[in-house]
Amino acid sequence: MRFSSRRLLAPLGLLLLAGLSSQRLTAQGTSATYVYLRGGDTLGTEALTAQGTQSVGRLALRNQPLIEWTHQRQANNRLGALRIRVLQTPTSATPIQDVTFAIAGDSLRVAITTGKTVSQQAVQVPMPDVVPLVNASVLHTAFVADYGKRRELDRIPIVLTTGAQTALAQLAQQGGRSVLTLGKTVYTITWAKDGLPETVDIPNQNSRIVRLR
């Protein structure tokens, strides 16, 4: 596994990972709410809406701004642009930061809006088909794991949206579970019948993400 060291944005939160399956998605969307647990502590919640053309997560971690991510789906099980909005509160009208990530050839194109300032960056990525990964969102990483499952991949090149580090995630299927390994961390995603995650277990972080409804 290879990591680069360039930094793109201010940190968005914890490096947690996990899941989403698209096999039963509809145009209207399938929605669920999840709780983030570490030991006996509740870290926050994330609401997930999965549709045929995109998935949207709204992550509210304790003492952190709200993170809203939208990842587009394309034909042939490909992924499109990823947009991340960082909001001071769930009711904020204007985001603290609004960032779009898109892969073009061997470059990651990043458009960043902060207040009235708009900037563009391009970062060269060392592997083809690199997928941008929202560091803080467990459910976005499972979305990426499901992308790999649908394409029958056992390895997924990713680039972290905080820090721009690149890595090669390992992916395996075990019955109704997906196991994604990133570095020394293993994420076990158990899928529900509707195609969304039921639980995500991260033993070395003493963490678990559980579906509430």
Image (spheres, helix red, strand yellow):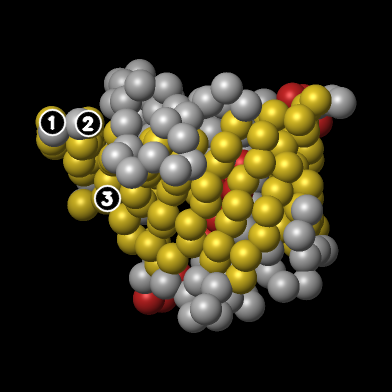
The disc, 1 or 3, on the residue closer to the chain's N-terminal end is 3
Tell me which numbered mark, 3 or 2, is placed earlier along the sequence: 3
According to the picture, the residue beneath numbered tag 1 turns out to be 117
Q: In the figure, 195 relative to 200: above or below?
A: below
Q: Amino acid at mark 3?
A: Ile
Label 1 neighbourhood size at 10 Å, few (<14), some (14-19), many (20+)?
few
Spatial CA distance of label 1 from label 3 is: 22 Å
For image coordinates 68% across by 69% down, the residue present is: 195
Density class for disc 2 (Cα within 10 Å; few <14, some 14-19, many ≥20) is some
Q: Residue 32 is drawn in which quadrant?
A: bottom right
Residue plotted at (67% across, 34% down): 44
Return the residue at label 2. Answer: 114
Horizontal relation, residue 70 to residue 29: left or right:
left
Q: Nearer the viewer, residue 48 or 125?
A: 48
Residue at the spot of label 3: 103
Residue 133's mark? none
Q: CA distance from mark 3 to mark 2?
A: 21 Å
- Res 64 visible: yes
